[in-house]
Image (tube, rainbow, N blue to C red):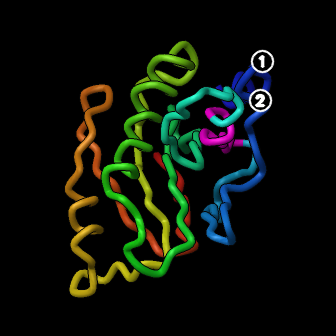
Amino acid sequence: MINELNNHATLSQYIEENCCENKICVSFDNDINRDSYVIIKVDKYYNSLNLGDTPPSVDCLIIRKCKYGGYGITIVELKNINETRFRKENLALKFKTTLDDFIKIRFGTILDIDYKDIKLYFVSKQEIYKRDLSLKLELLMNVKFKFNGKSLMIQPKMPTPTIKNCY
């Protein structure tokens, strides 16, 4: 699948070496081989369509080969903010667009598979310690998404979270 994505007529144009935006990034565990994952810049894809009303979408879609077969996916939104200067509804829509439109409809033939591991990350400078969580961040964590029979929730992360291997 990784080779198919790297050679895909459309998706290959949006594959990048790292998942970074405004100096906020994710990193990869040392035991994940660089050839075993791809990073697709979903927002760049939607922006390239030049639609009058561009749907909100996340920054990165990371697909990685799991250690014992199958694939894992991490969907990442990066925000260079210290405080709760984000709209929960817009952020939730970014994940929804990516799951329901990008993966299921636009590229369903290659991306809509049964993933072993699915993570949704919201990466910002917002303190995520439980007692310090803002109301917006807490509400965001309670937004649930259904994807291929699985219930998913957004996980807030501080920079620079590490993408772990899946098994």
Spatial CA distance of label 2 from label 1 is 6 Å
Q: Nearer the viewer, residue 104 or 81?
A: 81
87 versus 5 height, above or below? below
Amino acid found under the numbered disc labelled 1 = Ala
**Residue 26 placement (x, y as % from top left):** 60, 64
* Label 2 Cα neighbours within 10 Å, binned few <14 / some 14-19 / many ≥20: some
Q: Secondary structure at mark 1?
A: loop
Single out the residue that lies furthest toward the bottom: 131
The dot on residue 165 is none
| Magenta-drawn segment | 36-46
**Residue 27 placement (x, y as % from top left):** 63, 65
Is 76 part of what is drawn in magenta? Answer: no
The structure residue drawn at horizontal position 34% and vertical position 54%, both measured from the top left corner, is 154
The dot on residue 12 is 2
Q: Could you tell me if the residues under marks 2 and 1 are in contact, i.e. CB atoms within 8 Å? A: yes
**Residue 108 placement (x, y as % from top left):** 50, 17
56 versus 88 height, above or below? above
Is 43 part of what is drawn in magenta? Answer: yes
Q: Secondary structure at mark 2?
A: helix
Single out the residue that lies furthest toward the front: 52
Label 1: which residue?
9
Q: Is residue 149 left or right of residue 54?
A: left
Amino acid found under the numbered disc labelled 2 = Ser
Q: Is residue 62 left or right of residue 140?
A: right
Q: On the rendered image, what quadrant is the N terminus found in?
A: top right
The structure residue drawn at horizontal position 39% and vertical position 52%, both measured from the top left corner, is 91
Question: Within the image, what quadrant is residue 63 found in?
Answer: top right
